[in-house]
């Protein structure tokens, strides 16, 4: 399965739960820096709230170009 946004080379897909927490933020950044991954960031917050340096940096760029997607979900309540 090709998880890449249209026009990009094949990348693997990774979902990071609790994606806005301290450890997960660093994992998301490492996955994006590798260039091998499309990242689905899941968290309870209804919207992704970024610090200014994140919005202007790697995470903001990845969210804009499709390498990262934010999904608000409670993984304990999946049915």
Image (cartoon, helix red, strand yellow):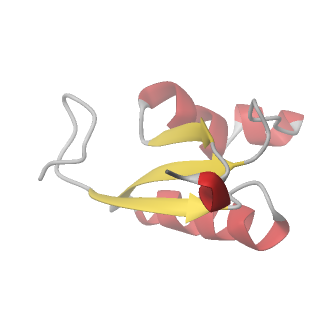
Residue 59 in the image: above or below residue 18: above
In-image side of 13 versus 41 (left or right): left
In-image side of 38 versus 53 (left or right): left
Q: Which residue of the protein is positioned furthest toward the left in this rendering?
A: 1
Front-most of residues 65 and 44:
44
Q: Which residue of the protein is positioned furthest toward the front in this rendering?
A: 79
The spot of residue 66 in percent (x, y) is 42, 33
Residue 43 in the image: above or below residue 60: below
Q: Residue at x 51, y 38 (%)?
A: 69
In-image side of 12 versus 69 (left or right): left
Where, by quadrant of the figure, is residue 47 drawn?
A: top right
The spot of residue 46 in percent (x, y) is 76, 31
Q: Residue at x 17, y 51 (%)?
A: 10
The spot of residue 68 in percent (x, y) is 49, 42
The spot of residue 23 in percent (x, y) is 76, 73
Front-most of residues 47 and 5:
47
């Amino acid at each position: 399965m090709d998880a890449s946004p249209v026009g990009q080379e094949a990348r693997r897909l990774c979902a990071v739960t609790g994606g806005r927490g301290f450890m997960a933020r660093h994992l998301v950044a490492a996955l994006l820096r590798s260039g091998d991954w499309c990242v689905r960031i899941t968290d309870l917050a209804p919207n992704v709230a970024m610090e200014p340096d994140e919005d202007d940096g790697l995470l903001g760029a990845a969210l804009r170009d499709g390498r990262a997607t934010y999904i608000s979900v409670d993984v304990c309540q999946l049915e």
